[in-house]
Image (cartoon, grey):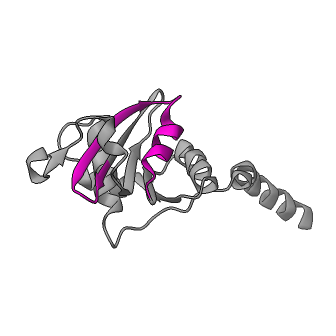
């Protein structure tokens, strides 16, 4: 993202406490996560966070909406953030891909998720509850078994 379009960029964590973020986009990884957001003052947040500090870092920012690319770990983190009282938006990866600019890395992916979540016509994926993850593989088997019992 071209930083010249914004009046200021993040210079340290001291500025973050005074800012409010309406949307924080998160690119999920195995060991680290990348956060991207734009404050109401126009300051760009782009920060890499380790897995151990991730949840506390997002709670500290206090966004009203959290956007992530839909994947199994996004559903897990989405449930955690919903329990904490945040609104979670999951976006299917095929809707994020058109917003990726430049070479693929975590920061650019988080920025693309932010851009996609900011669109008024974006379609979001609902967060799966933990029971649906357990019973979803069983539905095909159960349907086939009950069909064979009826014959």
* Closer to the camera in the image, 115 or 11: 11
Q: Residue furthest bottom?
A: 121
Horizontally, residue 47 falls left or right of residue 77, namely left
Residue 34 visible in the picture: yes
Expressed as whole percent of the image width and height from the top left, the position of residue 137 reads 71, 50
Q: Quadrant of residue 150?
A: bottom right
Can residue 51 be found in the magenta stretch?
A: yes
Residue numbers of the magenta segment:
37-63
| Nearest to the observer: residue 141 or residue 95 | 95
Residue 128: x %, y % from top left:
62, 56
Q: Residue 140 appears in which quarter of the rendering? A: bottom right
In the displayed structure image, the side of residue 74 where residue 144 appears, left or right: right
Residue 45 falls inside the magenta stretch: yes
- Residue 123, x across and y down, in percent: 42, 68
Q: In percent of the image, x 13 and y 52: which residue is there? A: 7
Position of residue 95 relative to residue 108, above or below, is: below
Quarter that holds the C terminus:
bottom right
Location of residue 28 in the rendering, given as x and y in whole percent from the top left corner: 44, 39
Above or below for 39 versus 49: below
| 50 on left or right of 114 | right
Of residue 113 and residue 45, the one placed in the foreground of this image is 45
């Amino acid at each position: 993202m071209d930083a010249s379009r914004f009046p200021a960029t993040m210079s340290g964590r001291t500025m973050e406490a005074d800012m409010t973020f309406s949307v924080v986009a998160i690119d999920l990884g195995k060991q680290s996560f990348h956060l991207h957001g734009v404050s109401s003052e126009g300051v760009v947040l782009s920060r890499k966070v380790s897995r151990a500090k991730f949840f506390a870092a997002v709670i500290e920012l206090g966004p009203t909406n959290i956007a992530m690319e839909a994947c199994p770990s996004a559903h897990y983190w989405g449930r955690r953030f919903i329990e904490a009282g945040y609104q979670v938006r999951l976006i299917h990866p095929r809707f994020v891909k058109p917003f990726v600019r430049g070479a693929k890395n975590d920061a650019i992916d988080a920025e693309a998720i932010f851009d996609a979540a900011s669109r008024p016509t974006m379609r979001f994926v609902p967060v799966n509850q933990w029971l649906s993850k357990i019973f979803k593989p069983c539905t095909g088997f159960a349907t086939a078994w009950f069909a064979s019992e009826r014959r």
